[in-house]
Image: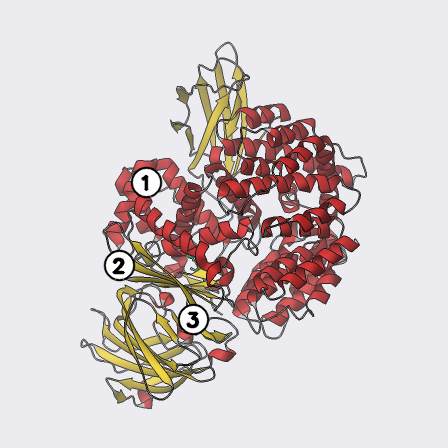
Amino acid sequence: GQIIHLEDYRPTDFVLERVDLTFELDPKETKVEARLIFHRREGVDSAAPLVLDGDELTMTGLLLDQEELATTLYDVAEDTLTIRGLPETAPFEITITTLLSPETNTQLMGLYRTNGVYSTQCEAEGFRRITYFPDRPDVLAVYTVNIIADKASSPLLLSNGNYLGGADMGDGRHFAAWFDPHPKPSYLFALVAGDLGVVEDTFTTMSGRDVALKIYVEHGKEPRASYAMDALKRSMKWDEEAFGREYDLDIFMIVAVSDFNMGAMENKGLNIFNDKYVLADPETATDADYANIEAIIAHEYFHNWTGNRITCRDWFQLCLKEGLTVYRDHEFSADMRSRAVKRIAEVRHLKSEQFPEDAGPLAHPVRPTKYREINNFYTTTVYEKGSEVTRMIATILGRDLFKKGMDLYFDRHDGQAVTIEDFVACFEAASGRDLRQFALWYHQAGTPLVTASGAYDATKQTFTLSLEQTVPPTPGQSAKEAMHIPLKMGLLLEDGSEAALAAVSGADMTDDVLHLTERNQTVVFSGIPSRPVPSFNRSFSAPINLHIEQNADDLALIAHHESDLFARWQALNAIALGNLVEATANVRAGKPVTSDKALIDGLIRAAADNSLEPAFRSQALALPSESDIAREIGTNNDPDAIHAARQQILTAVAAAGRDTFLKLSDELVSSGGFSPDAASAGRRALRNSALTYLVQADEGPERAAKAFAAANNMTDLSHALALLAHRFPDSAEATDALATFRKRFADNALVIDKWFAVQATIPGAGTLDRIKALMNEPLFNGNNPNRVRSLVGTYAFANPTGFNRADGEGYRFLARQILDIDPRNPQLAARILTSMRSWRSLEDKRAGHARKALKEIAGASKLSADVGDIVERMLKA
Ligand code: HT7
Ligand code: ZN
């Protein structure tokens, strides 16, 4: 594929006014008739042809104003249909007939049929697999959709907008017509047909309109959709209260499908979901599943305003809808749950997924300027860093001006396809602030590094901070400019109280936000009565790396006294990371590992502190992951040494905290019925954290096996299963538990995914053989993205010692899997391949094996654009 550049953007020559689609559904041969009404845009050359996009289409008819078009007037090329000789100013109608085979569409883009259900996925460029079309997000049109299908196998016929009517056709088929009054880009088109069960409810909007809510799932699974329905109603209410946004159709539908490339899709009025993010009950869903469902239901619903009513001018602007909508779903979850605990989880995720992307060969700006395959830009940088950039705007402007800017954005751009510049301009207009330097966050890739050192002058009672910021070079960007970094901070005094920051020179400061804008900045705080301990980046106000010489005592002061709970966790985490990095070095040098007293005391103190919420204490107890440690070390990594070091620290904490952990595991036994609410989930999380440490210190599998037998919900059951399988993989107890679990849930594929994932993450080189055996399991299905992700994806992304085997077999296995998946589902293959994005930070031998495996992929005879693009960027020096 060729490279697309932002600077080449220009509007279409023709304006699309209306779209009328008729689908005659058939598994092998679906007929699509598209009637498109266009007119030439003013000022466009009268000879300019109409160029439409297409992908793997069979065209059987082409009419201009109902007359067959002469073959001399059009050309069909590999991905385009070009039509010449069109009217100079008058509107005209193009009618295109195409034939599709939904049953053999394994890519899951365009129209496909699995398990008897027809569904579509059109973002980003799937609509062109349905018909020839100006398939780009700045082409907005009003759609009417007619669906004809066999009545017995597809009693349900759905599309976007409001239902117009339907009828029996007398030949075993029936039809339904839908009309969507809101102009939309083609990527938001959706169609679903099949035989599904439904859960129904209604929502009354703030202006008093009733909206019918429907969630469609496989027959028999209706009870498992009630939590999703509840989350939907809460989302609708929250968007009215927090952003003043009301829903705009008479009906809102969600369909759960079992074969889906991503989490879900925000099609106008008809969201389509991976069933993993809809279905839940206590027996089959973990607390994490419930939280994900709540977040993703909200995310897709929120897109109705940030994405659908206001959409992207082109795909370079993807963060316009994704970064903003992630920010909105984060705020929603924070309001539904504990804000501090939610923030900790977000930052853990950002650091473990986005920071490595930003530090490796796939790094790109939040708003990229070129791409080869847009599917590869649905990244954690666009989504999560994009959300952080939105959060920083809110931090810099403050709550009221941020709201004013959002209101202006909705007002000014409703019904338009816009850019990041348009978005930022709304906040500049609302606040009067110049955000030009701030906008570098959209354009410069790489995680900024801020280095800080402080000096206290007791006679002058001043504290002087010397700050330096650098942004590391990333592919295609070597030199960077200084950024505007909003750093929330406080100065803690030795008794744990906070110094008043009344007199500050050298930087702007609003409330507790210090605005860094220069490469080097010296900031002086006056009136500081004693040597302070600075607490930086409260609530992670800026997505940066921070280097500051702080000893464990200073960090412990923050961990015990900060008013910001997030900052307490951050300090504990910093103590842990320092200890783990040092322990890794000792393992590699053949020296004994020692655990930091400040770490052990801090963890146990947090665990035992009943004044803190249990979910927070559980987060405090979770040591940095092996990949967190690898990232902190940065280069020449040995995953086996990291694992060994971390295990030794875990064991030391377990031994020192034994009494506390025993007490917690007794006290927090759940009694009574299950509730998925955040407080109950927090108690389960803390108890399971305590159990993890107890099992860590156990000689044998008895305690873990007992926990497995006693579990009465999926959170506890899957946790106990993982403890058994990871800590005692070869024990009869682990084997039995795995077999019991498999037998009990064999008919529930989503639960079996947990069973695959637990086994894929067993540490050590032996896991690869287990995975190969599991691929021959009757419950495994290489065509289902959820199955492939839970086994192969989890192995590559989440098993550092198993995947990074010293002999390179893990990489060779992955290369073969990628080449096997690619012809069926390139998107899935490309995404799993990104698990190797940090290969250059491995020690030489492993890096050599990884390079060889990547080269094997790169050298394959037929690669999709998706995989070709990823592998090429990963190998680029
Ligand atoms: N906007 C949706 C993205 C998406 C997608 C992209 C490429 C291929 C398949 C896809 N399925 C969904 C999801 C979202 O961010 O809300
Ligand atoms: Zn989204």
Tell me the distance, in whole angstroms, between the alpha carbons under discs 2 and 1. 21 Å
Identify the residue position indicated by label 2 in the image.
Answer: 415
- Can residue 547 be seen by looking at this rendering? no
Residue placed under numbered mark 3 in the picture: 120
Q: Which amino acid lies under the numbered mark 2 shown in the image of this protein?
A: Gly
Q: Position of residue 484 (x, y in %)?
A: 42, 37
The image quarter containing residue 820 is bottom right
User: Is 68 above or below relative to 616?
Assistant: below
Alpha-carbon distance for marks 2 and 3? 24 Å
Cβ atoms at labels 2 and 3 below 8 Å apart: no
Identify the image quadrant of residue 435: top left
Residue 143: name its quadrant.
bottom left
Give the amino acid at mark 1.
Phe
Q: Nearer the viewer, residue 787 or 21?
A: 787
SS of the residue under disc 2: loop
Question: Does the image show residue 36?
Answer: yes
Q: Nearer the viewer, mark 2 or mark 3?
A: 3
Whether residues under marks 2 and 1 lie with C-beta atoms below 8 angstroms apart, the answer is no
Q: Residue furthest front?
A: 672
Q: Where is 178 relative to 593, above or below?
A: below
Q: Earlier in the sequence, mark 2 or mark 1?
A: 1
Q: Quadrant of the C terminus?
A: bottom right
Q: Residue at x 34, y 76 (%)?
A: 51
The colouring scheme, among rainbow, by chain, secondary structure or one colour, is: secondary structure
Residue 402, which numbered label? 1
Front-most of residues 500 and 314: 500
The amino acid sitting under disc 3 is Thr
Q: Tag 3's secondary structure?
A: strand
Residue at image position (58%, 39%) is: 619
